[in-house]
């Protein structure tokens, strides 16, 4: 038995064990059955092209519709099936959780991907969603918390099920971010991610010992170096951006941004700082789609009767929105550049794979809030809260009650973690301390909701504000002791972001689900509310395979 077959079997065993643990808790919704999902379309697509625009709120797709090219996003909107009211069903809407959900149908309470990073509740040690020190990047330096494998993903994906049913099927995932490639690739696919230190794309030793020739050829051409001193120019005339904020807003601070923008700035030659700067530009996405073209040719994707999956997560929009906000002209223009890239990519797919041989689907891992300064300009209550200062105030309240300082240890993902060793030392009851912490948190002007570990585990507050969505973000083994959600338009202070995401509000949960494939899909706008968890059973049905075992979605209502 070869190494890859052994890995498939090991992944299946891991998933079955996780399923048994996950489904035992009270209140867990039943998984979708394989029977319903195997009612396949008359013919399976030879290739599923699964596209993700990181950080794309649905409001941008509709707001800029009149400025789209005829065959980019408009291909979905005019000639495909698209869902106008698609949402994430959980509260902590961040990149890793979204990428874990899309092709597994499992929200974080099942998948175990509760955030991009979190801390071990017992030891305080940092954890990253895809870190795994057993593996390294191929040909590139690897740091301790770099993403190298899907070991922390406790759910299987559509690709895992497909490869188990049809071992000759290929599942390739590409992204500017490690988590954007590794999580959609699942346990049995292959991930390639952008290396911001070298400008290359690399896989890891979890997947292979060395890159195939087509990847080596792509990297040998030094694609990132082609953009050195290139200008990011506006796609349209200045008047076209009237509905967006002008460049260099005062609150941009040290993240000042203005178009046109020269890549590489004052540098004499490409260097790590330059390669990293491409992440907040259209050029990292051009490279990701370039690698996707190379993968189609190099792996002969869609070239036989075994269906393949190509997942491409375009990371640039998220970096742009964090830096300058989704309301900025830079974000608006970045979206328009993405539109042009997609038009070129779709035409390439038509010419190489064949327009009646593939299905394309596009979604996002989360939306985006407006920067607090923008919300205040609109007359809304908004602001930023420093997590360290918040923790200090909560600890001061707990010390008044229990006479013990620093009972709150840290925030992890979207929860406060209580210091368990200190509780034991002082003979304090966890339930009593978490109840007091919850009350203190609810007294904070930025906090909308807070629920204790006991409430989350028992699902005892069903219907309370944000509770049901927060339950789906909370995993008993790795999440903290008091789960929180901030009020609308509030965010935690960040050293790297002017705006962010991570809330249960529509600006973060409402994302596109767009589909195209004339042989399988009719042109239609669907207004029925759907969830991103519904993608996995939908693609499973189209591919004629069982639904992933932890999926909690339902097939999308295709006309």
Image (cartoon, grey):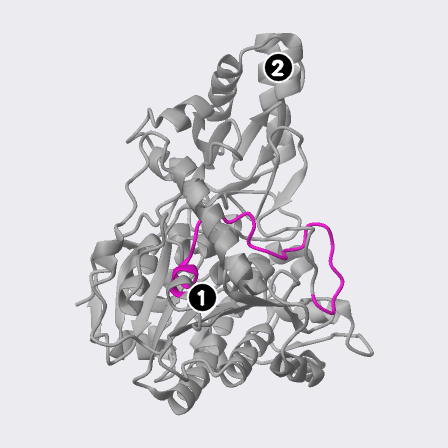
Q: CA distance from mark 2 to mark 1?
A: 44 Å
Q: Whole-percent x and y of residue 93? A: 45, 48
Residue at the spot of label 1:
52
Instruction: Choose top left, top right, bottom left or bottom right for residue 220.
Output: bottom right
Q: Quadrant of the C terminus?
A: bottom left
| Camera-side residue of 339 and 376 | 339
Disc ID at residue 160: none
Give the farthest residue toward the left.
559
The stretch drawn in magenta includes residue 140: yes
Q: Quadrant of the N terminus?
A: bottom right
Q: Whole-percent x and y of residue 119? A: 62, 37
Q: Pointer 1: residues within 10 angstroms few (<14), some, or many (20+)?
A: many
| Camera-side residue of 380 and 269 | 269
| Main secondary structure of the magenta stretch | loop
Which span is picked out in magenta? Answer: 138-162
Q: Pointer 2: residues within 10 angstroms few (<14), some, or many (20+)?
A: some
Q: Whole-percent x and y of residue 537? A: 30, 58
> Residues at badges 2 and 1 in contact (C-beta under 8 Å)?
no
Q: Between disc 2 and disc 1, whose residue precedes?
A: 1
Identify the residue at horizontal 28%, vertical 66% (top origin). Answer: 544
The stretch drawn in magenta includes residue 389: no
Disc 1 element: strand
Residue at the spot of label 2:
423
| Camera-side residue of 504 and 220 | 220
Classify residue 160 as left or right of residue 147: left
């Amino acid at each position: 038995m070869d190494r890859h077959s052994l890995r498939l079997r090991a992944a299946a065993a891991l998933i079955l064990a996780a399923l048994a643990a996950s489904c035992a808790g009270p209140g867990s919704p039943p998984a979708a059955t394989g029977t319903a999902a195997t009612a396949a379309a008359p013919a399976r697509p030879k290739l599923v092209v699964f596209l993700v625009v990181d950080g794309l709120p649905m409001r941008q797709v509709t707001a800029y519709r009149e400025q789209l090219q005829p065959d980019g996003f408009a291909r979905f909107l005019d000639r495909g099936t698209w869902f106008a009211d698609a949402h994430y069903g959980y509260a902590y809407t961040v990149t890793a959780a979204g990428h874990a959900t899309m092709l597994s149908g499992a929200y974080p309470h099942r998948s175990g991907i509760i955030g991009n990073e979190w801390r071990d509740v017992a030891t305080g040690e940092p954890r990253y969603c895809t870190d795994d020190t057993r593996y390294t990047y191929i040909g590139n330096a690897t740091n301790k918390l770099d993403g190298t494998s899907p070991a922390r993903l406790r759910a299987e994906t559509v690709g895992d099920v497909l490869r188990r049913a049809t071992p000759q099927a290929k599942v390739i995932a590409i992204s500017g971010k490690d988590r954007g490639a590794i999580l959609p690739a699942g346990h049995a696919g292959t991930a390639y991610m952008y290396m911001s230190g070298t400008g290359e794309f690399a896989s890891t030793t979890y997947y292979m010992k060395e890159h195939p020739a087509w990847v080596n050829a792509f990297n040998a051409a030094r694609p990132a170096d082609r953009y050195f001193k290139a200008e990011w120019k506006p796609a349209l005339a200045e008047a076209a951006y009237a509905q967006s904020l002008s460049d260099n807003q005062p609150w941009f601070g040290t993240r000042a941004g203005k178009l046109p923008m020269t890549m590489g700035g004052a540098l004499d030659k490409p260097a790590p700082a330059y390669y990293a700067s491409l992440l907040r530009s259209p050029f990292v996405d051009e490279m990701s789609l370039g690698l996707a073209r190379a993968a189609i040719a190099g792996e002969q994707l869609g070239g036989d009767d075994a269906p393949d999956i190509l997942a491409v997560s375009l990371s640039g929009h998220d970096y742009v929105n964090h830096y300058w906000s989704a309301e900025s002209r830079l974000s608006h223009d970045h979206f328009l550049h993405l539109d042009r890239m997609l038009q070129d990519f779709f035409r390439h797919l038509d010419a190489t794979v064949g327009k009646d041989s593939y299905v394309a689907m596009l979604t996002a891992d989360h939306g985006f809030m407006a920067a607090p300064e923008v919300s205040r300009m609109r007359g809304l209550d908004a602001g930023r809260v420093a997590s360290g200062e918040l923790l200090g105030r909560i600890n001061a309240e707990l010390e008044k009650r229990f006479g013990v300082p620093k009972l709150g240890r840290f925030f992890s993902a979207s929860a406060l973690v209580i210091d368990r060793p200190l509780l034991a030392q002082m003979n304090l009851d966890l339930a009593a301390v978490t109840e007091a912490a919850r009350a203190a948190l609810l007294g904070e002007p930025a906090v909308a909701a807070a629920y204790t570990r006991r409430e989350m585990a028992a699902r005892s507050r069903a219907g309370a504000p944000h509770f049901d969505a927060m339950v789906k973000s909370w995993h008993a083994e790795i999440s903290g002791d008091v789960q929180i959600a901030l009020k609308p338009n509030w965010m935690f202070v960040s050293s790297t972001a002017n705006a962010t995401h991570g809330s249960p509000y529509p600006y973060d949960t409402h994302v596109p689900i767009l589909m195209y494939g004339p042989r399988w899909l009719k042109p239609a706008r669907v207004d029925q509310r759907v969830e991103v968890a519904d993608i996995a059973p939908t693609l499973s049905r189209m591919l004629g395979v069982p639904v992933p075992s932890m999926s909690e979605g339902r097939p999308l209502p295709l006309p």
